[in-house]
Amino acid sequence: MSALTDVFAPGSAFATLLPWLPLVIKGFGLNLLISALSMVLGLLLGVLLGGMQMAQTGVIRWPARFLTLFFRNSPWLVIMFYVMFLLPFEIHLASFLVRIPDWIKAVLALTIPVGGYVSEIVRGGLKSVPTTQWEAAGALAFGPVSTLLKIILPQAVRQMLPPTMNLYCSVVMATSLANIVGVQEVMTITQTILSTETRPGLILPAYGLTLVLFFAYVFPISLLARRLERVWQFGAH
Amino acid sequence: MTDSQTPSAHVRLTDVHKSFGKTEVLRGISMSVARSEIVCLIGPSGSGKSTILRCINALTPTNTGSIKVDGIEVTDAKLDALALRRKVGMVFQSYNLFPHRTALQNIMMAPIQVLGEPRREVEVRARELLAKVRLEGKENAYPGELSGGQQQRVAIARALCMNPEVMMFDEVTAALDPEMVKEVLNTIRDVARDGMTCILVTHEMRFAREVANRIHFTDKGRIVESNTPQEFFDHPQDERTQAFLDKVL
């Protein structure tokens, strides 16, 4: 019992961190915003690239294949740096001067690898549906577009959803990379706390807190992904 | 092939050639199928039987020659493939049901979504067809919950629900356990008796003899013998036919 009361005692690590908690959570909120936006944009990019990878014509297929492999095989941190320094601080839109906040740049940076991964997930999902399904639909007079929408995609989505959810988990964790380029996300805020507080031995509890936040958010999603994978692997429904 | 000139042919192939790369699969196929006729294609595997069926409903494009189905020229560059396939139903060896849809939904999908028929009418017809293939009570079963023979009968009902004029069966019992073959053959027999024009690729010799009006024997991309079942099985003319029948009978 005494160990427990020690944790909450005045001057303990917990007591020192407690007042910072709202700020930490607010920072984590930015991480979630970045992850959600880059996931949405990455999905758009990835579905486009993945669809192009399935094209019959090489002129469409090969550029998409190249971009997909390039996006997938570049270190996320390097892409982050590139986007940060490549994008201007502000842009002219008509007569307006629009500032691009750093966190938006982080979103765009994460969108690139996410697009690459989604592209492969889409390609794999579409390929997982046997070509005989296309033929069966064709023999029933379904056109190519309605075959894709009504018969192929509903089956492919089952293949694609679990890996997409796992990818989202990776994206949430990767948002902590944004601290290196100065975005006020949870890691940056934790570093600020550590440089403000003078109490020794605060490093592990402070980072431990961020760890717990990430884990509490990501773990249920990854559990759900694993469950869907199991359920959809066997039954057709 | 004088019968390919018959004017009343429902399906007619004239000198059809097809190559995959350098492999010539069809080397001048000519045959005609009259309305309500039951035609069986028999021959060693790789002799082009399945390719003939796939060319007839334009799943596989031909190189040269002509295929006419009820007045539609299949080899026409501006072919309306969907109009063709509304007339021609096809059942595959591997059933190819849609695994994410129930038996009833599999049957109802195309008539509703392709033909634009009202759901209520289609459902009545679909339930009748399920009863006809002796699968009452399996309306809400998913393909994964059905045996091979049951899946194949759903596939037949699915093709029939489009009200086709011609039905093609591509080795539909080849993937089935022996005890399920009979139930599927019974279903096909019913379809044939209803006056549907049928083209079957099959290895079931006794069945072919029983239901067919005419048998074509294919070998290396050619039809080497065409005859009535009686003549075909009892007095085969071509030595390739004789050699084949010696092996399988």
Image (spheres, rainbow, N blue to C red):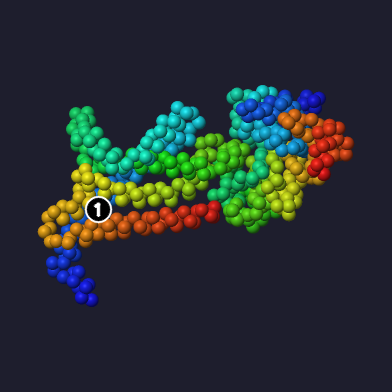
Q: Is residue A174 above or below residue B232?
A: below
* Residue toward you, B72 or A89: A89
Q: Residue furthest bottom?
A: A1
Q: Residue furthest front?
A: A201
Q: Which residue is depicted at the point 76% across and 37% down? A: B43
Q: Is residue A184 left or right of residue B1?
A: left
* Residue toward you, A104 or B87: A104
Q: Residue furthest right?
A: B235
Q: Which residue is depicted at the point 40% across and 33% down? A: A66
- Mark yes or no: residue B194 visible: no
Q: Is residue B224 above or below residue B138?
A: above
Q: Which residue is depicted at the point 82% across and 40% down? A: B245
Question: Which image quarter is the N terminus of chain A in?
Answer: bottom left
Q: Chain of mark 1?
A: A
Numbered disc total: 1
* Residue toward you, B36 or B201: B201
Q: Is residue A148 above or below residue B63?
A: below
Q: Quadrant of residue B74?
A: top right
Point out residue A153 in the picture as x, y percentages from the top left corner: 49, 43
**Residue indicated by mark 1:** A28
Point out residue B53 in the picture as x, y percentages from the top left corner: 68, 35
Q: Which residue is depicted at the point 21% across and 38% down? A: A100
- Mark yes or no: residue B64 visible: yes
The amino acid beneath tag 1 is: Phe
Q: Is residue A77 left or right of residue B110?
A: left
Point out residue A206 in the picture as x, y percentages from the top left corner: 21, 59
Q: Quadrant of residue B232?
A: top right
